[in-house]
Image: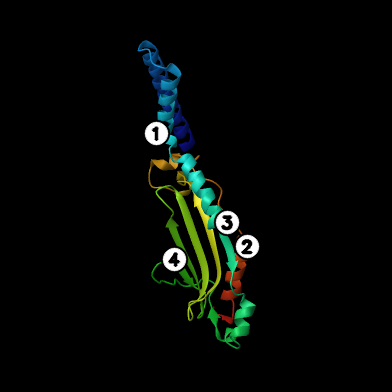
Amino acid sequence: MIGLIALFVMGIYLAISIFIVRGTARWARRTGRGVKRWAFAAAFGMYLLVFWDHIPTLMLHKYYCATKAGFWVYKTPEQWKAENPGVAETLTWKSNPPDYKVPNITEGYRLNERFAWVIRREQASVLPVRLHYESIIDVKTGETMVKRIVVGSGYGNFLVGGGESWNVLKFWVGAELCDSNTTEFYSDIHAFQQMGREIK
């Protein structure tokens, strides 16, 4: 249903655009101005009304994918255990970790007494490009064990509850997530969490 509405709205927009471009061309011909130049200007203006954010969003997304996105392992569970002998055995964990709340994060989860999984999301600019930071930290020392940065873009869509305005109809804005080593990152979360014994 929403897809039909989107197609209907785009059809109306296309019809209005054609009407305006033809009207501008007729006006330019009648007044002795350059028909092609004025028709192109009208078409470009109508394009920008809806698609102004398309190319800039793709460019910014690509830039952040090249300069920000990635996966970093600073210390493996085995290295941490070697540096902290006997501590891992004293830790306890739950299959549903409790919330971990500290300033400057969007959400967090306490994996056990020593480790937390922290998440921070930020909008990169006025364009719909987002940076998603995830880290596993040692809450006692503040040291980061593992980190990843994911870059996403677009306005979301109604079907998944995304977006808070009619911009969600702009399904063409955005690109695939720059999301590397997801499996390895979540494997590390489990490895750091499941030190010691599980609390039922």
Cα distance, mark 3 to mark 4?
A: 19 Å
Q: Please name which of the two marks, 1 or 2, marks the residue nearer to the observer.
A: 1
Q: CA distance from mark 1 to mark 4?
A: 36 Å
Q: Which circle, 1 or 4, is nearer the viewer?
A: 1
Distance between mark 1 and mark 2 Cα atoms: 41 Å
Question: At label 4, which amino acid type do we have?
Answer: Glu
Q: Is residue 101 above or below residue 30?
A: below
Asked if the residue at tag 4 contacts the one at tag 2, i.e. Cβ–Cβ closer than 8 Å, the answer is no
Between 107 and 78, the one lying in front of the other is 78
Q: Residue 98: where, in percent of width, then height?
A: 46, 72
For the residues marked 2 and 4, what is the alpha-carbon distance in whole angstroms? 20 Å
The numbered mark, 1 or 4, whose residue comes first in the sequence reads: 1
Residue 145, image x, y percentages: 56, 73
Which of the two marks, 3 or 2, is nearer to us in this view? Answer: 3
- Of pointers 1 and 3, the one earlier in the residue sequence: 1
**As drawn, 129 above or below 52:** below
Q: How is the image coloured?
A: rainbow
> Circle 1 is placed at which residue position?
49
Q: Name which residue type carries label 3.
A: Asp
- Could you tell me the amino acid type at mark 1? Leu
Q: Which residue is mark 4?
A: 107
Which of the labelled discs sits on residue 40, or is there none? none
Identify which residue is drawn at 44% across, 72% down: 100
Q: Which residue is mark 2?
A: 183
Q: Name the foreground residue: 126 vs 11.
A: 126
The local secondary structure at tag 3 comes to loop
Residue at the bottom extreme of this rendering: 86
